[in-house]
């Protein structure tokens, strides 16, 4: 019994063949890790974790509608994400407004998604997958669209990285210096919408936080360097996703528990290390004779 | 309204000039017919209750708010959004753990934060930031995460960040709010020293005049849609403020502090100051 359970979770028979078969999934995971790791830094500094969750539920609704009406899951989830991101970006300039708008949108999106899935006559495994992730053999066109969207997000972030960080840390000062803070916050929401839409494809809408928030939160436990944090966050996200997909290959379980577990363990380890460091007083003050480079 | 102004006697070049300026939102007039000249090296406190239009005045100067009438010029030209030669120091608000910045990075945003791209480290930038950290006395914690700094330490960095653009004018919006008395003194002295060293005009918005009483050259006192401009000795008098408020107001001087009692909007005393004394 225990053996059965174990082989459902971990099974490495015919691993080589499976690996080749699911090569696309692994590439998709790596690309997604880069996107999640980078945009996660801004999700943290703009305090938008809840927005990520809200957008992902609307993305789920869009994907389900796409499935039901035959438009396509990818197209549907992108549309749902972008609509949610735009609504949150336009109406939720202030944190309090934003949270209530998200709380209003989220159950509606989830309900809409469940409605579409209930009406959909196809297989149930697909339905469940949109919420909790799945090992889909990512075909070439799907992989290409995922890579294309990811490139848009990464370049889009890189171009405005500095003013966006300025606006995230202190919108008033940034705006006094001529940084277009309102434009940037809408721009960010749209990039976030795209990032969520591609993540939903792999880990499912309920677990998107594990790649868009957890890796960046873990990185911030270890460092405050504006160069190291995005780097670590990206590494953590890629390790979680690629590691999760590789572990999931042989088992009969969706990939999300593997991804979320790895991502969670990384966070716990970083928290422990970060906690020890600050208890030792090693925060970089030169009085403590511990200069921190980075 | 006659301003108790002594512009003609002041040396130095005008940095900022408001002429016959009025600001109204709908039927509510915040202030009108305001004439104010800030010269290089001059420290002017802007004092008044909440809603008296102090912060709106700063927004006008930053080009974020249009005047209802009148003109505002910075360095001889009409103000525009995002002028790099205006340094802005906001109220202190604690940075949270989600901020991937160290003290030096916060100051660095003042240098290049408005530029596109990723902030790749460079030696020249590092040297500039080092010298700014040095001038605000923050070298010791240059590499500390800002979420680990006290409010007073963060405000020193804000000053450094504002100085990064080589400003001609510093706009300070309640920079001492929620700091303890020691840090209030430290931060206001820092601003005072820097304006002398760099010949900066300073507009310093505050609830409480006391921390900067010995430093300011003049003050702009806003109340009930009207204002007075003059030296603290000219403005902080029972007769002057009673006329301004249109009701009897007492100015009490005690142990080097000034307390205005009897204003319709409560005494102008920093809420924390009483406890700390």
Image (cartoon, rainbow, N blue to C red):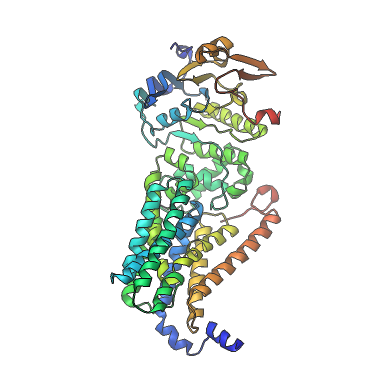
Left or right: residue A63 versus residue B250 is left
Q: In which quarter of the image is the C terminus of chain A?
A: bottom right
Residue B24, quarter of the rendered image: top left
Query: In the image, is residue B18 above or below residue A86?
Result: above
In the rendered view, tell whether residue A247 sits above or below residue A269: below
Comparing A14 with B39, the one in front is A14
**Depth check: B237 or A220 in front?**
B237
User: Quadrant of residue A112 in the image?
Assistant: bottom left
Q: In this view, does A229 lie above or below B114?
A: below
Q: How many marks?
A: 0
Q: Tell me, yes or no, if residue B273 can be seen here.
A: yes
Please name whichever residue, A150 or B107, is drawn nearer the observer in this view of the structure: A150
Q: Quadrant of the N terminus of chain A?
A: bottom right
Q: In percent of the image, x 49 and y 73: which residue is there?
A: A256
Name the residue nearer the viewer: A146 or A284.
Answer: A146
Q: Position of residue A232 (x, y in %)?
A: 53, 63
Is residue A72 something that shows in the picture?
no
Identify the residue at horizontal 40%, vertical 29% (top origin).
B60
Most extreme residue toward the top is: B239
**Residue at point 61%, 65% (across, down):** A268
Question: Where does residue B87 sit, x and y in percent of width and height?
Answer: 47, 34
Q: Which residue is drawn at 52% across and 67% down?
A: A236
Quadrant assignment, res A123 = bottom left
Q: Residue B123, position in %: x, y?
A: 50, 50
Q: Where is residue A204 in the image (x, y as percent from the top left)?
A: 44, 69
């Amino acid at each position: 019994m225990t053996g059965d359970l174990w082989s459902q979770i971990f099974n490495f028979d015919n691993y080589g063949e499976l690996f080749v078969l699911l090569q696309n999934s692994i590439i998709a995971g790596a690309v997604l890790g880069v996107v999640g790791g980078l945009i996660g830094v801004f999700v943290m500094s703009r305090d938008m974790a809840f927005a990520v969750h809200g957008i992902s539920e609307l993305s789920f609704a869009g994907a389900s509608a796409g499935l039901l009406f035959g438009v396509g899951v990818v197209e549907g989830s992108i549309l749902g994400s972008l609509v949610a991101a735009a609504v949150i970006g336009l109406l939720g300039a202030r944190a309090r407004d934003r949270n209530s708008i998200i709380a209003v949108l989220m159950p509606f999106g989830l309900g809409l998604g469940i409605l579409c899935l209930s009406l959909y006559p196809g297989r149930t495994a697909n339905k469940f997958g949109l919420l909790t992730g799945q090992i889909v053999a990512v075909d070439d066109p799907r992989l290409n669209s995922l890579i294309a969207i990811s490139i848009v997000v990464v370049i889009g972030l890189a171009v405005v990285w500095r003013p966006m960080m300025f606006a995230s840390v202190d919108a008033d000062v940034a705006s006094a210096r001529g940084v277009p803070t309102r434009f940037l916050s809408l721009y960010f929401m749209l990039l976030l919408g795209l990032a969520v839409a591609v993540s939903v494809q792999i880990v499912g809408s309920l677990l998107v936080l594990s790649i868009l928030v957890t890796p960046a939160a873990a990185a911030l436990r270890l460092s405050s360097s504006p160069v190291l944090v995005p780097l670590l966050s990206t590494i953590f996200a890629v390790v979680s996703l690629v590691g999760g997909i590789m572990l999931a290959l042989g088992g009969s379980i969706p990939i999300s528990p593997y991804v979320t577990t790895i991502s969670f363990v990384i966070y716990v380890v970083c928290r422990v290390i970060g906690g020890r460091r600050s208890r030792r007083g090693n925060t970089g003050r030169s009085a403590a004779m511990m200069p921190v480079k980075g | 309204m006659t301003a108790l102004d002594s512009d003609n006697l002041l040396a130095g070049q005008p940095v900022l000039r408001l002429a016959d300026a009025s600001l109204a939102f709908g039927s509510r007039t915040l202030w009108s017919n305001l004439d104010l000249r800030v010269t290089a090296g001059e420290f002017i406190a802007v004092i008044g209750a909440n809603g008296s239009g102090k912060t709106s005045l700063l927004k006008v100067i930053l080009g974020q708010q249009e005047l209802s009438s009148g003109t505002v010029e910075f360095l001889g030209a009409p103000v525009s959004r995002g002028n790099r030669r205006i340094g802005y120091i906001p109220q202190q608000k604690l940075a949270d753990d989600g901020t991937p910045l160290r003290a030096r990075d916060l100051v660095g945003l003042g240098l290049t934060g408005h530029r596109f791209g990723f902030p790749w480290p460079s030696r020249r930038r590092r040297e500039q930031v080092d010298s700014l950290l040095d001038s605000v006395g923050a070298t010791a914690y240059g590499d500390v995460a800002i979420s680990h700094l006290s409010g007073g330490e963060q405000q020193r960095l804000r000053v450094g960040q504002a100085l990064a653009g080589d400003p001609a004018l510093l706009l300070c919006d309640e920079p001492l709010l929620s700091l303890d008395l020691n840090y209030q003194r430290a931060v206001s002295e820092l601003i005072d020293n820097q304006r002398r060293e760099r010949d900066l005009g300073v507009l310093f918005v505050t609830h409480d005049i006391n921390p900067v009483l010995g430093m300011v050259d003049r003050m702009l006192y806003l109340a009930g849609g009207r204002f007075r401009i003059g030296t603290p000795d000219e403005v902080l008098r029972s007769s002057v403020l009673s006329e301004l408020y249109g009701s009897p107001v007492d100015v009490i001087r005690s142990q080097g502090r000034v307390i205005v009692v009897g204003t319709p909007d409560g005494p102008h005393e920093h809420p924390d100051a009483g406890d700390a004394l």
